[in-house]
Image: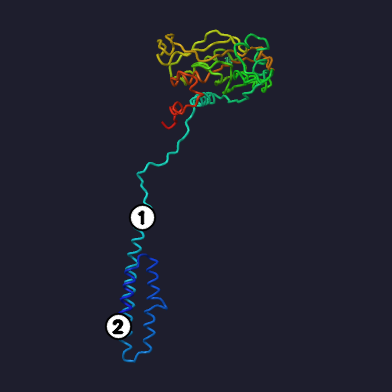
Amino acid sequence: MDKITEVQNQALEAIAAAADLDALQQARIRYLGKKGDIQALMSEMKSLPKEEKPAFGQKVNVCKQVVSEALEKRQAELQEEALAARLVEEKIDITLPGTKHTLGTMHPLFMIQQEIEDLFIGMGYKVAEGPEVELDHYNFELANIPKDHPARDMQDTFYVDPNTLLRTHTTAMQMRELEKAEGKTPIKLICPGKVYRRDDDDATHSHQFMQCEGLVVGEHITLADLKGTLEHMANTMFGNGRQIRFRPSYFPFTEPSVEVDVSCPFCNGKGCSVCKGSGWIEILGAGMVHPHVLEMNGFDSEKCTGFAFGIGLERIAMLKYGIDDIRNFYINDVRFLKNFDRFD
Ligand code: PHE
């Protein structure tokens, strides 16, 4: 009987001393396992005299129960401790600043290009694209600027070889599209893209810039159609109430040719620093497609006419966003580009 008490005390001590769940499991095996100490006491019962057996058996059972309960209790405690320790260890501080994923921003020139595309697609124009490395043939010859024509000096050119160059204007695309149409009308398209000229870069000049050409060819197309179209464009891009005016100009591929001004959107035509007091701002060059250009491209200039215009995208973006140096568009300073965050 004393042995039972001894085993029970030992077991309870071992359980109380178990510092973790592994140690507790060892104690469980040692005392409650099939080959454990309490089971050994049970086996000893066989050798006792008959009358002692019940009291002995009862005491072993009580011992087994006491030890089991102590084990359960200690196990619950240790599990709780283990969980508490894990919670401390794996604690996430949700107040720490997160990792920010930076997003790119839309380039201002691309925004203008999209605005123009949306506007003209809405009027049934298609958008054409073409090569920046262009043949002299499309950039100059078909545009009515033969070799040694003085107009070649208007556009100082980067040549790759005597017949290949970096296109100096999107008018090259106009010629490609005219040729492709094989004399069939109507044609209604715009072509946005980069162009290149040998210029010394400064606040208003860049050796690379963007244009968007517009071209319409069909029967009975007149200068009035050109004016109405550009007026609509000016009102969409610079706000309602804009007026436009035509000033005579010269381009070899249009006749007549015009420079187009828009009434200043900043002072409503009264005169301010942006329009230099004139009330007007020049925004593009345009004209009626030269009959010779139509003929060279396989059109009957007696039957069809057309208008064309070429917009400088930097100029529009500079006016719209108040940018005073064209180089900003190309030096890729993030501090500048961030101003055009689409989520602002
Ligand atoms: N190609 C001309 C330029 O680059 C612009 C223009 C296009 C003028 C179409 C008239 C018609 O200056």
Tell me the amino acid under the disc marked 1.
Answer: Leu
Q: Quadrant of residue 178?
A: top right
Question: Is 175 in front, or is 108?
Answer: 108
In the rendered image, which quarter contains the C terminus?
top left
Per the rendering, the mark at residue 2 is: 2
Left or right? Give the position of 140 relative to 20. Answer: right
Mark 1 and 2 residues: CB-CB less than 8 Å, in contact? no
Q: Which residue is denoted by mark 1 in the rendering? A: 87
> Counting other residues with Cα less than 10 Å from the Cα at mark 1, is it few (<14), some (14-19), or many (20 or more)?
few
Q: Where is residue 217? Give x, y as percent.
A: 61, 18
Q: Where is residue 126? Give x, y as percent.
A: 58, 25
- Looking at the image, which residue is at 34% across and 64% down? 78
- Looking at the image, which residue is at 37% across and 86% down? 44
Q: Where is residue 73? Give x, y as percent.
A: 32, 68
In the rendered image, which quarter contains the N terminus?
bottom left
Q: Quadrant of residue 179?
A: top right
Label 1 sits on a secondary structure element that is helix
Ligand 1 under 8 Å from disc 1 Cβ? no
Label 2 sits on a secondary structure element that is helix
Q: Where is residue 214? Give x, y as percent.
A: 57, 19
- Looking at the image, which residue is at 33% across and 65% down? 76
As displayed, is residue 207 above or below residue 49? above
